[in-house]
Amino acid sequence: MNYLLEVDNLRTYYYSKKRIVPAVDGVSFHLEKGEVLGLVGESGCGKSTVVRAITGLIDPTYARVEEGTALFCDADLLKMKEKELSKIRGKEISMVFQNPLSALNPVYTIGNQLTEALTTHFSVSRKEAQDRAVELLRLVHIPSPETRLKEYPHQLSGGMQQRVLIAIALACNPQLVIADEPTTALDVTIQAQILDLLKELRSRLGMAIILITHNMGVVAAMCDRMLVMYGGVVVEEGSCRTVFASPSHPYTKGLLASIPSVTEDRQRLYSIKGQVPVFSVPVSQCRFLDRCESCTERCRKEEPPLFSLPNGSKCRCWLMEERQGKEND
Amino acid sequence: MKRYVLMRVLKAILTIWFVYTLVFFLARLTGDPVEWMTAAGGASEEAKQQLRHNLGLDLPLSTQYIRSLAGLFTGDSGNSYYYARPVSELFAERIGYTLSLGGIVFLVTIFIGVPLGVFAAVKHNRPADRLTMAVAIVGNTMPNFVLGILLIFFFSLKLRMFPSGNIGEPLWRYYVLPVIALAVVPTASAARLTRSSLLDVVRQDYLDSARAKGVREWKVIFKHGLRNALIPVITILGAQLSTLIGGSVVVETVFAWPGIGTLIVNSAQQRDFPVVVFGVLVIASSVTIVNLLVDLSYGLLDPRIRDSY
């Protein structure tokens, strides 16, 4: 039980006038200290909701955590009051958001926003906070940090803004950094730089990272283990090595097949047909069946459990029933 | 930035000059002040002519205009026809009452209206929000003179809690009803604007960034949310503030308030040209000054605007 974070059976529903949407419908996973976990899936699969629920950042006006536990250093984040949770946020667990420009407040200087994380959690003098801010900007390779501190977000390029966000996330030396699509809004060359930076920081500082992305290439470059999500549930889980080498779930296979390749000569890029459907509770079928090429009658009647496979992966597909080691849901 | 301010001041001076000129000639279209002064009858044509001469009204219009304009630069605002005293003195006596009334109303708007709007936005779509907004809409649609008359009716005539108008001792009691009458509309509109503007802002990612840093919710709203939400609020409040400085003519009349609003209205009726023209000069200047301050405050609030000057 020495996981840094252990999430068990997390359910988060969105309430609209028409229906209840199971955005996260029974997700369990764990994260070891210093591990990099990839959370992969299309838009709307619930990957962001998972981390928002854990960190208490879901909007209570339409979303609610229904059940589940999220043990962080053996304390359940989901049972914490806002006050306790805010002591962990930014200090032990911090976040890097997708769009760096909109994630930085346009009316405050970089320095102000950097030192805020420090002054919120520690009683430090202005000078100490300032020095730490300069140090943090150096850490993320921002040139002339002293001048940058006095600048505003709009005066920086997108890549610089994302570096600043990473610096803010690292301000209090957190044990866990959650990066929600940290490179999606950036140019491809900048994406590579930011990923390199994250890798470098990870090996220097040793924090665990949850990396949310829809980009399989990012997962392959960064992660130790990965969770593939679809329709609010985990459909496949395993070490990146295993999943990339032998994907089990039809959805994962589809995702991997749709990565453009330079070695193969394909006329058209493979794509998974159809769109991510929106579900209503309760769901009593395989969530992927409409888009699955090997769906059977059984998939319409019963939702498959997460089967544990001999190769160490887990997969939520009836095709895996005979291959399973032991059933586990 | 300096260039921007300089250009704005030059434009403001041009605007004020234009308004001054317009009112100068328009006022003279209303008729002959001497006829109004002697309306009771009994004045001979000779006496009237003498009076016109004394007031400088027998000079060509262009000469009158140039004299009046030149007077402004030498600090001579002319004499009131009616009070036979320097116009600047008349305004100096009254402007304090108008400014203090407007100032208090402005403070009430900021320190009650804006927090109410924040409260409603935080309680979005809950009963507290709906109740606050229902009250604000009623307040927003209530004409201030109607409210003034109602206040006088209930609190002065029926309950005898506050004086119905003018000023006296203790001073604060005389401020209560006019302040309420004047403050309700701007406070209500400040609350509504703050709410809707803040509701736009709370969807922004940077509020979640602040929360993710562990910043407490009230600080997230007030430090990160409100400052971004204030620009539209300041635009409207600025417009309302400038009318308050100009003297809320109708409300001053309802409460017999000794401010410049009443002075200007009475003077217009009495064809007291120097007072009217000077009054318009004061109002036009205050409106343009407040507008300039409002525009400059955008830059203070938002560095992106500052950079675009």
Image: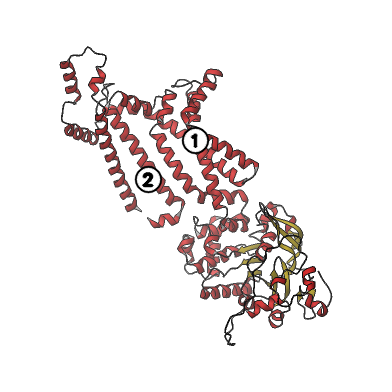
Question: Residue A78: where, in percent of width, then height?
Answer: 73, 57
Question: Residue A107: where, in percent of width, then height?
Answer: 49, 55
Q: Is residue A128 visible?
A: no
Q: Gap between marks 1 and 2, in whole Å? A: 23 Å
Task: Choose between B48 and A92: the one closer to the eye.
Answer: B48
In the structure shown, which secondary structural element does the residue marked by tag 2 occupy?
A: helix
Coloured how? secondary structure
User: Residue under mark 1: which chain is it in?
Assistant: B
Instruction: Look at 35% across and 35% down and name the residue there.
Output: B283
Question: Relative to A145, is A119 above or below?
Answer: above
Instruction: Look at 27% across and 30% down and name the residue there.
Output: B27
Tell me how many marks there are.
2
Question: Relative to A129, is B164 above or below?
Answer: above
Q: Which mark is residue B292?
A: 2
Residues at marks 1 and 2 touching, judged by CB atoms closer than 8 Å: no
Question: Residue B151: where, in percent of width, then height?
Answer: 52, 25
Task: Choose between A309 and A57: the one closer to the eye.
Answer: A309
Q: Quadrant of the C terminus of chain B?
A: bottom left
Which residue is labeled 1 in the image? B185
Question: Relative to B128, is A253 above or below?
Answer: below
Q: Amino acid at mark 2?
A: Leu
Residue A88, quarter of picture:
bottom right
Residue B300 placement, left or right of B93: right
Q: Amino acid at mark 1?
A: Val
Instruction: Look at 79% across and 71% down and name the residue there.
Output: A304
